Image: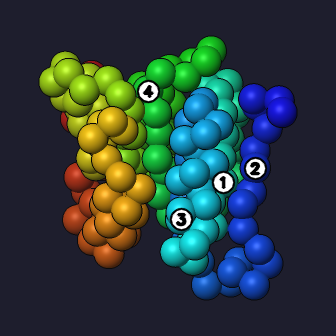
């Protein structure tokens, strides 16, 4: 499979009522496992596998319409997740989409950088089960405006 491909992992019956999650994760096993887990919870899951594909997607306002939340890895081929997060949060059309970083980079410096750039939360993959990630996504989506305000990048950039 080409790593720049987008895989839409839902069936048509779910399209009308489900929330859409965009996974930006280069590990096919992790992204497919999480996509299946979310699909089983009635979400639409779309996956991108490298930074260039993600940067093209987040730069296209029409393609980002309908995305309810982004789960973003930091270590990606070609362009890192921090650059994608910056692009999402600097565009008025996408800056209110909540982003949860899901990464194995667990040091405080990376966590602080993600939050400074506008991530609403940071999950360390090695410490989280799929159900923990689903719970966090549900909390963020249920939080509405409070998460949108929290996802504004800090002005220290």
Image quarter hosting the C terminus = top left
Where 140 falls versus 127 (above or below)? below
Q: Nearer the viewer, residue 19 or 61?
A: 19
Could you tell whether 74 is left or right of 28 in the image?
Answer: left
Mark in the foreground, 2 or 3: 3
Q: Is residue 73 visible?
A: yes
Q: Tell whether label 2 touches label 1 (CB within 8 Å).
A: yes
Residue 7, numbered label: 2
Residue 153: x, y in percent?
A: 29, 38
Sequence-first tag of 4 and 1: 1
The span from disc 4 to disc 1 (Cα, nearest Å) is: 17 Å
Q: Nearer the viewer, residue 71 or 150?
A: 71
Residue 28: x, y in percent?
A: 64, 37
The span from disc 3 to disc 4 (Cα, nearest Å) is: 21 Å
Could you tell whether 47 is left or right of 147 in the image?
Answer: right
Residue labelled with disc 3:
38
10 Å crowding of disc 4: few (<14), some (14-19), many (20+):
many
10 Å crowding of disc 2: few (<14), some (14-19), many (20+):
some
Residue 46, numbered label: 1
Residue labelled with disc 4:
74
Q: Secondary structure at mark 4?
A: loop
The span from disc 1 to disc 3 (Cα, nearest Å) is: 10 Å
Q: Residue, x 32% and y 58% (percent of image)?
A: 132
Q: Residue, x 59% and y 32% (percent of image)?
A: 27
Residue 84: x, y in percent?
A: 51, 30
Sequence-first tag of 1 and 2: 2
Sequence-first tag of 3 and 4: 3
Sequence-first tag of 2 and 4: 2
Sequence-first tag of 2 and 3: 2
The span from disc 2 to disc 4 (Cα, nearest Å) is: 20 Å
């Amino acid at each position: 499979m080409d790593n720049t491909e987008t895989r839409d992992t839902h069936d048509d019956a779910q399209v009308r009522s489900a929330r859409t999650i965009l996974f930006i994760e280069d590990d096919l096993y992790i992204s497919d496992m999480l996509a299946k887990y979310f699909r089983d919870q009635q979400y639409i899951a779309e996956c991108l596998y490298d930074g260039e594909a993600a940067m093209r997607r987040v730069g296209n306002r029409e393609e980002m319409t309908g995305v309810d939340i982004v789960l973003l890895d930091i270590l990606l081929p070609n362009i890192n997740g921090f650059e994608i997060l910056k692009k999402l949060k600097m565009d008025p059309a996408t800056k209110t989409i909540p982003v949860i970083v899901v990464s194995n980079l667990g040091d405080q410096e990376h966590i602080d950088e993600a939050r400074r750039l506008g991530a609403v939360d940071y999950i360390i993959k090695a410490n989280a089960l799929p159900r923990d990630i689903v719970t966090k996504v549900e909390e963020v989506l249920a939080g509405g405006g409070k998460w949108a305000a929290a996802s504004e990048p800090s002005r220290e950039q």
